[in-house]
Image (tube, rainbow, N blue to C red):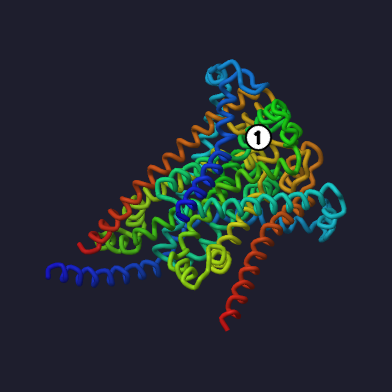
């Protein structure tokens, strides 16, 4: 009896919290569908704001910019970290702890401090350094480093990389080739989750792009910020579209996570099999 | 049999491989080139900016002499004193409210059926993406000057809603709490999994009720995670920029906004003073982490003296 009461209480807590969390989101969606909301209920259902957005040629460029700037740094950061991990895994396992420290510092720095400190250092210098887009890409690389590093480290733990490399070297591979052709392909599915998480993080970024990119690289978030002062409905429609894109990325994360649970077990079998050949 | 032989030979050759490995290592160090891009990235975009910022915060503009004046200036001007105070209290409030709600949210998840748990977790996951400018804007249409809830308040004569001012300290707390809840709850869920059913049974065997269980067993066990989550929420709030910027622009003094003004402002750039403000922000974040670790250690000592 007491248990049932408790279940009811828990359900109430979850329903209330869900309602609280969904309210602003749902309201923004409703707001984008009506012409006016100046009394109790909205009036004048319309899809005009979405049509307007999609017909505006100025709408696609910021979205394209956002997609580019949220994937290129992630690709770059993943490649750089994978290469660095080669040295750690194969040659100097003891350096692992330093690697971990350098990769976790950005997590505690947060966007503002990182962006400001990079801008302050490089904005006065000559070109390759003061180029805003290069600066933005590198800042993003550092910002997502903790997540990329965690993803790679976790997948490395799951596959026993040293064993794989030893086995591949028995088959005549050089260490680097063994790492790139045997270990890295095995990492990929594990990395994709942290990869997509980072993409969605950068996709929603406003802090860094506002400080460093400024008007040099107006992304969708900047476009949204400017739109806020023009039309409420239009802004709501834009928010809904951006949020839907973010959800699409997170849905990818979820699907991959489910699949990974299965494939990690499978990979362990493959790795074991490899070793006993 | 065959397998064992294969295994033995595999072991032997893996020893040989290891020897080859080490020989390879001694001969050439070209492999270190693979580490080069990483080192360059870390030095140029993580360590160098950070160190120059700390050093610059102690320099006099133009002359470059060592000084504490930048830090003194933070406390001399009301604008910046307010920024520190507002950031600190906004973060403490939002993290405090956030952690309490996160505790009950995670507790509800822990005690619920799998299906409900999954649904609620997906909602948390989804809404944790809703932050920054979009979040600020949706609070504006909810509770801003012409917000939907303001209209409702006017319609039903609820003066609290009708006169609510989103562009204030309490408005900021409200919006900040929104993004603290999903994060805090998701961080607390794993901690609850560490609570064992047997402990609860043991307490009830000894005649203790639910309240006693939570105060004597549950909360002390969860304390490290609660403090840890609190400091994550605090850092999250103290460094948050987009939400406050979109909601209030420069009209409310908060550290992250005042910091960025010193560097990107159209007016005068004051890098030295801005650096001091940024170091101040880092000190706040590190301070709360250290404080929570210290509290934890003290709680641990107290518990061990109980044992004696």
Q: Can residue B99 be seen in this view?
A: yes
Give how far across and how far down residue A191 sits, in percent. 41, 49
What residue lies at 52% left-to-right and 39% top-to-bottom?
A70
In the rendered image, which quarter is residue A271 located in? bottom left
Give how far across and how far down residue B265 sits, in percent. 76, 39
Is residue B183 or residue A255 the one in the foreground? Answer: B183
Give how far across and how far down residue B20 sits, in percent. 32, 69
Q: Mark 1 lies on which chain?
A: B
Residue ID for mark 1: B139
What residue lies at 56% left-to-right and 40% top-to-bottom?
A21
* Up-down relation of residue B112 to residue A167 (above or below): above
B234 left or right of A152?
right
Specify the quadrant that holds the C terminus of chain A.
bottom left
Which residue is situated farthest in the left direction here? B1
Specify the quadrant that holds the N terminus of chain A.
bottom left
Is residue A235 or residue B44 the one in the foreground? Answer: A235
A29 left or right of A117?
left
What residue lies at 26% left-to-right and 56% top-to-bottom?
A270
Q: Can residue B41 be seen in this view?
A: no
Which residue is situated farthest in the front direction here? A1
Is residue A36 or residue A225 the one in the foreground? Answer: A36
* Up-down relation of residue A267 to residue B116 (above or below): below
Number of residues whose C-alpha sits closer than 10 Å to that of mark 1, classed few (under 14), some (14–19) or many (20 or more): many
> How many labels sit on residues?
1
What residue lies at 50% left-to-right and 44% top-to-bottom?
B125
């Amino acid at each position: 009896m007491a248990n049932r009461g408790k279940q009811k209480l828990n359900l109430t807590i979850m329903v209330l919290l869900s309602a609280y969390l969904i309210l602003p989101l749902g309201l923004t969606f409703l707001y984008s569908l009506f012409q006016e909301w100046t009394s109790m209920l909205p009036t004048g259902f319309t899809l005009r704001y979405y049509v307007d957005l999609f017909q505006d040629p100025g709408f696609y460029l910021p979205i394209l910019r956002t997609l580019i700037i949220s994937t290129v740094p992630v690709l770059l950061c993943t490649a750089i970290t994978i290469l660095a991990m080669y040295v750690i895994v194969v040659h100097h396992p003891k350096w692992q702890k330093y690697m971990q420290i350098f990769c976790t510092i950005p997590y505690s720095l947060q966007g503002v401090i990182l962006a400001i400190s990079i801008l302050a250092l490089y904005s006065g210098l000559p070109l390759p350094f003061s180029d805003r887009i290069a600066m933005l890409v590198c800042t993003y690389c550092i910002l997502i480093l903790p997540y990329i590093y965690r993803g790679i480290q976790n997948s490395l733990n799951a596959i026993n990389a040293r064993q794989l490399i030893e086995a591949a070297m028995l088959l005549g591979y050089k260490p680097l080739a063994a790492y790139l052709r045997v270990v890295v392909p095995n990492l990929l599915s594990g990395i994709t989750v942290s990869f997509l998480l980072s993409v969605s993080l950068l996709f929603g970024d406003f802090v860094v792009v506002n400080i460093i990119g400024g008007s040099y690289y107006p992304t969708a978030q900047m476009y949204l910020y400017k739109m806020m002062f023009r039309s409420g409905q239009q802004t709501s429609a834009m928010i809904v579209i951006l949020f839907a894109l973010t959800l699409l990325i997170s849905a990818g994360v979820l699907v991959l996570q489910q699949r990974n649970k299965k494939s990690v077990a499978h990979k362990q079998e493959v790795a074991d099999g490899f070793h006993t050949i | 049999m065959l397998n064992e032989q294969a295994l033995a030979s595999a072991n032997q050759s893996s020893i040989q491989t290891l020897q080859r490995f080490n020989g390879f290592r001694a001969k050439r160090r070209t492999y270190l080139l693979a580490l080069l891009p990483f080192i360059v990235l870390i030095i140029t975009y993580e360590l160098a900016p950070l160190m120059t910022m700390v050093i610059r915060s102690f320099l006099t503009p133009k002359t470059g002499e060592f000084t504490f004046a930048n830090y003194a200036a933070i406390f001399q001007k009301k604008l910046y004193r307010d920024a520190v105070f507002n950031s600190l209290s906004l973060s403490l409030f939002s993290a405090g409210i956030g952690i309490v709600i996160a505790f009950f949210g995670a507790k509800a998840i822990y005690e619920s059926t799998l299906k409900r748990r999954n649904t609620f977790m997906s909602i948390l996951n989804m809404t944790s993406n809703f932050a920054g400018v979009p979040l600020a804007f949706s609070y504006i249409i909810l509770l801003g000057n012409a917000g939907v809830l303001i209209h409702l308040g006017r319609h039903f004569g609820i003066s609290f809603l009708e006169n609510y001012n989103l562009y204030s300290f309490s408005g900021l707390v409200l919006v900040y709490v929104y993004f603290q809840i999903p994060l805090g709850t998701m961080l607390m869920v794993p901690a609850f999994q560490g609570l064992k059913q047997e402990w609860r049974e043991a307490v009830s065997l000894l005649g203790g009720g639910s309240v006693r269980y939570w105060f004597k067993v549950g909360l002390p066990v969860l304390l490290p995670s609660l403090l840890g989550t609190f400091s994550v929420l605090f850092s999250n709030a103290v460094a948050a920029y987009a939400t406050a910027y979109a909601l209030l622009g420069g009209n409310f003094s908060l550290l992250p906004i005042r910091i960025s003004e010193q560097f990107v402002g159209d007016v005068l750039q004051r890098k030295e003073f801005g650096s001091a403000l940024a170091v101040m922000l880092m000190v706040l974040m590190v301070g709360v982490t250290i404080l929570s670790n210290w509290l934890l250690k003290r709680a641990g000592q107290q518990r061990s003296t109980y044992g004696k």
